[in-house]
């Protein structure tokens, strides 16, 4: 297993994409977990947005994985929070500075302008070969599927 898929997900979309990628690629699948669990519901939502906008630090772990050195390819699947990279994914980028692997990022979000958040992802993951953005409220099912399949193809063609 030389491919790792890691994801952070609050409502399940990123998780579903990550699970599918891992299955198709026979990859190791790991969740980026915040050590201090977040509240669900409206208060949790507001706090999540506040933390993301203000780039608050959060401790994370990768569900038992400590070293990424053995992976040739790493795929990160993330939502967008408050026009920014969620704190857990930001921390993942700092903790596991990915140098040697081929890195791909799949972002899914509701509908805000990617110009607002893409530079922030690019700054945190400067080595990413490609960033794919699925805009759930604007992309048709076919377009979203095509984007998803394009990630699979990019990884397979490496
Ligand atoms: C706290 C919070 C803030 C969000 N901010 C944005 C945003 O700025 N722009 C956007 O397009 N979507 C935003 N979303 C929507 C998520 O990015 C989107 O629903 C994503 O698909 C969720 O992925 P998940 O199900 O893996 O958590 C936000 C969601 C949450 C929970």
Image (cartoon, rainbow, N blue to C red):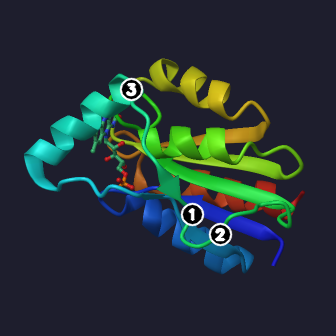
Helix, strand or loop at label 3? It is loop
According to the image, label 3 marks what residue? Answer: 83
Quadrant assignment for the C terminus: bottom right
Helix, strand or loop at label 2? It is loop
Lower position in the chain sequence, tag 2 or tag 3:
2
Image quadrant where residue 23 sits: bottom right
According to the image, label 1 marks what residue? Answer: 62
Location of residue 93 in the rendering, given as x and y in whole percent from the top left corner? 63, 41
According to the image, label 2 marks what residue? Answer: 65
Number of other residues with Cα within 10 Å of mark 1, as a class: few under 14, some 14 to 19, many 20 or more:
some
Location of residue 102 in the rendering, given as x and y in whole percent from the top left corner? 84, 51
Could you tell whether 131 is left or right of 30 in the image?
A: right
Q: Kindly report the distance in space between the C-alpha atoms of the residues bearing marks 3 and 1.
A: 24 Å
Residue 151 or residue 67, whichever sits in front: 67
Q: Residue at point 77% right, 61% down?
A: 68
Question: Quarter containing ligand 1?
Answer: top left
Q: Residue at point 81% right, 59% down?
A: 73
Callout 2–callout 1 Cβ contact below 8 Å: yes
Q: Is mark 1 within 8 Å of ligand 1?
A: no
Helix, strand or loop at label 1? It is loop
Residue 60 or residue 112, whichever sits in front: 60
Q: Kindly report the distance in space between the C-alpha atoms of the residues bearing marks 2 and 3.
A: 29 Å
Location of residue 96 in the rendering, given as x and y in whole percent from the top left corner? 69, 48
Above or below, 30 against 33 in this view is below
Number of other residues with Cα within 10 Å of mark 2, as a class: few under 14, some 14 to 19, many 20 or more:
few
Q: Kindly report the distance in space between the C-alpha atoms of the residues bearing marks 2 and 1.
A: 5 Å
Could you tell whether 101 is left or right of 97 in the image?
A: right
Q: Is mark 3 within 8 Å of ligand 1?
A: yes
């Amino acid at each position: 297993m030389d491919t790792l898929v890691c994801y952070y997900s609050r409502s399940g979309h990123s998780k579903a994409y990550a699970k599918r990628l891992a299955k198709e690629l026979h990859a190791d699948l790991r969740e980026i977990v915040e050590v201090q669990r977040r509240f669900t519901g409206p208060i949790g939502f507001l706090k999540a947005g506040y933390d993301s906008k203000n780039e608050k630090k959060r401790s994370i772990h990768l569900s038992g994985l400590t070293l990424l050195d053995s992976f040739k390819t790493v795929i990160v699947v993330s939502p967008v929070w408050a026009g920014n990279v969620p704190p857990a994914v930001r921390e993942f980028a700092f903790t596991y500075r990915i140098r040697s692997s081929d890195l791909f990022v799949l972002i899914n979000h509701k509908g805000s302008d990617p110009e607002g958040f893409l530079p922030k992802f690019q700054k945190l993951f400067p080595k990413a070969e490609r960033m794919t953005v699925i805009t759930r409220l604007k992309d048709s099912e076919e377009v979203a599927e095509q984007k998803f399949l394009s990630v699979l193809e990019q990884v397979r063609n490496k």
